[in-house]
Image (cartoon, coloured by chain):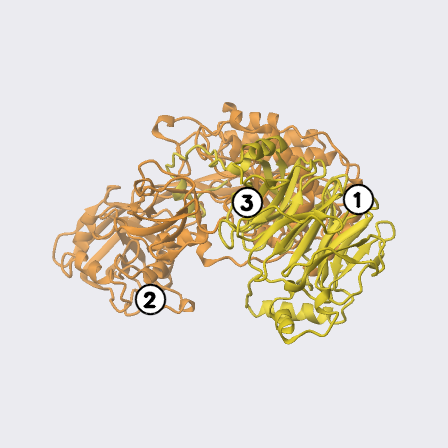
Chain colours: A yellow, B orange
Amino acid sequence: MRATVTAALALVLAGAALLAQAPASSPERDFLTRPRRLTVEGRRAGEGYWSKDGKQLVFQSEREPGNPFYQIYLMDMGSGDVTRVSPGMGKTTCSFINPETHDILFASTHHDPRSKQLQDEELKFRASGQERRYSWDYDPEMELYVRSAKAGTYRRLTNARGYDAEASYSPDGQWIVFSSTRQAYDHTLSAAEAKQLETDPSFFAEIYIMRADADGSGVKRLTNVTGYDGGPFFSPDGKRIIWRRFDEAGLIADVWTMNLDGSDQRQITNFGAMSWAPYIHPSGQYILFASNKLGFENFEVFMVDIDGKKQPVRITYSDGFDGLPVPSPDGTQLAWTSSRGGGREGQIFLAQWNHERALAALRAAPAR
Amino acid sequence: MHRAAILLLVALAGTSSVHTQTAAPATRPFVETLASEKLGGREAGSADERAAGDYIAAQLARLGARPLPGRSDMFHSFAFAAGSRDAGSRVSITAGTAATRAYTTAADVQALSFSDDAEVSGPAVFAGYGIVVPESQGFGYDSYATLDVKDKVVVVLRYFPEDADQQTRGILARYADLRYKAMAARQRGAKALVVVTGPRSPNAGLTVPMTLDTALAGSGIAAVSVSGAVSSVLFANGKPLVDAQKDLDTGNPHVAGFELPGVIVSLKAALTRERRTGRNVLAYLPATAPVTNVDKPWIAIGAHYDHLGRTAHSGSLASRDDAGRAHLGADDNASGTAAVMAIAGALSKQPMRRRHLLIGLWSAEEIGLLGSAAFVATPPVPVDQLAAYLNFDMVGRMQENKLVVQATGTSAVWASILERANVAAGFDLTVQPDPFQPTDVSSFNGASVPSLSFTTGAHSDYHKPSDTAEKIVYDDLDRVATFASAITRRLMDLDPAPQFVKVEQSTQTASRTGVRIFTGTVPDYAATVKGLLLGGVVGGGPAEQAGLQKGDVIVEIAGQAITNIYDYTYALDLLKIGQPVKVVYMRGSERRETTLTPAARR
């Protein structure tokens, strides 16, 4: 490498007794080894969820010209091939792979005739050089779809107006748990409710469950507490549901678990911060989640024992966003979304997960 | 650009299954041979370089590569100047009625490295700092605005106004390079340029050391530097130089130069340029089927194989204890050469190649990217037939699984290709869009070829005799070669060819020969943090004295916000030697301040 083209680079090296190159050791390495950026293409990517055999990862990413919203992609963890599995039009989010059939579940607005118009408007807004803070619009057009692994065709699973998203399958692939704001659209709203819907539609989101072969009927509501309930997943044994519950103001969130019928709701975390995106390790022994306990815009990944009896343990140490942790089905890897690659937008990162050290750290954690 | 990205998805989905698995490349023998004492550090134009080139050509022939079409061997020669020496420059001055004074020693008069060989005589005129800011910059500064210098000998100060405000210094510094000053004088009809290092500047009164200039011809004007003793004679009958410089140092563009009344300068500028011939090694693996319907039927891979050699070289960072030891250049760049050989080896076993694989091992990279520049200037294969170029420079010292890929901004396909190939390779990738890098990828970007450059980054043995073969991490070097082989295979099948995207060069990344500040900071080039992450500080340097240490992130210096290394190099122009400035930095999550006093660079 030539050092003299950029003289300043040369001068900083000139005569430099460069120091030993061992990087400052980060406590992150206790649990995460060989961390690396998995997604490279496009402006942003996130929410990577594994197939049951660990050979595929489904995720959302903004990476195609003409559409400034997330679409859903499937990565083959062997060959590295990446294919889009959503229709390409409109907004999508929150995908999940059926453990038995490999069908792909996701939320989408592609049926909305305004999709193209909304895409163009967003692109125009960006071209104008303006920026807005990250926000999620809880588009009431969002409906759940499943893409058949065999035929590649799409089937719509919900048809109630309202944001239907954040869905995942049970381990046997027979059930779907999801979040929906449908209660804000099924009756005439009072003036107070209408104002609430305008300022924060997520306020109306609750957790629902339905059969995986649903046609829009047979949906059962599981939560009934004021404030945003979302991001539900089944426990590895299929007997519990884990999710996050926001307070009424939508600023503080905590991780909760409950039975499949909505009974026995238990609060796991109480940081007094935004603790969300929980996922249970395949061992069933502990929960990984994200929290901004250390600074409003600094989300880090934490873990806590399955019953929340002890203090959570911090996992990641980097500025900006680290969240949406999802362990691989064999429990040896962790995929998560992070802005550590630079810029404000996240990409998916992957690291080896040290389960034994995690257990030891949880044992050593002080009681709550 | 958009269309290509979409088609790529299709193309990749359809071709991945035909990629054959090949045995892991073995880079070690190549590195150990190229970085051996026997090859002495492979200085461009030397017998060592020739021997290394012969070895590379023989190895390429062994794996079935051939000379390029229309050529009988694998060597591509080019001439360059390996160095220059003053060959008896002298100056004599007649000031009014005083006796003529003549100077002949190197301490008093030295040709500048880009001077013409010439003997001239004429009346002297002082043109201040000799700086002309182009009108396009919207900043009026022209040292020649009020002067007629036609057929005269122009005397100018080295550097740029010492006391100007930061913004003015920042602009003037960009046009203070001596080569640029010589061009400005020549364009105004001057006979010669005489450079004086002013009494108020660093290195006051000293002549300018000979620097390496690889051009074979002079710049069209006689140019010398003279000592303080000589300049005192030039300014004997008028305003003393120190006073004139003081006025000029304000940066006020209305402070003009002046005639040196009655002063006649006769000078001879004489240089000996050592002319040498460097050799690129060029070969190719032909496509396995006719390429008549293939869009841009060539993929190029390359690395420079030259290094600094056995002698003290301007690029050497060897300490005095190392004097006389060869710079073996195991990482820089036997490692990149070995990666290219390994990729060629892997591709030679590929049963199907839709495109030709051009293999280029460049010489004279260390003295200015000369080999790759010669290739793109007179390309044996038209550069518009190259679908892509992959460059490898210092890929043998991987730490913590980190691999840096540069120039990703040159095509929209790179992010997509890197993502897919890295799923299996598993590197902790850092992607840097900027193609204006101090390595051969710059030459190909300049020729509008979509390019990538791979590196594992700088280290403490950089440009020192201690960059030796046993320090190479061979397992990881082999992994880099495997990764790049997979990318090369994808490129072979990619249709249409990647589309080139022109990345605008920030003016801040332009050559900074005027930099003269020393801060003792060692940036971490792989960093992606906002600010300048320090990979270390030079022992005893200003940064260390200011309490800065490895891992600190500089976010502000002298009131200038620093978001990347270019901001930092630009900010260096604004600093004054010996004048303390405030530095704001992050240590972990803590914001701290300190005071740093820049020192002079020799």
Dot 3 amino acid type: Asp
Mark 2 = which residue?
B141
> Helix, strand or loop at disc 3?
loop
Alpha carbons under labels 1 and 2: distance apart: 71 Å
Marks 2 and 1: in contact by CB < 8 Å?
Answer: no
Task: Judge if badges 1 and 3 mark residues of a common chain.
Answer: no
Q: Please report, as a chain letter, where disc 2 is located.
A: B
Q: Please report, as a chain letter, where disc 3 is located.
A: B
Is residue B10 visible to us here? no
Is residue B595 visible to us here? yes
In the figure, is residue B273 to the left or right of B224? right
Indicate which disc, 2 or 3, sits on the residue closer to the N terminus: 2
> Helix, strand or loop at disc 1?
loop
Q: Residue at x 37, y 58 (%)?
A: B175
Numbered-mark total: 3
Determine crowd level at label 2: few under 14, some 14-19, many 20+ residues with C-alpha closer than 10 A: many
> Helix, strand or loop at disc 2?
loop
Mark 1 = which residue?
A99
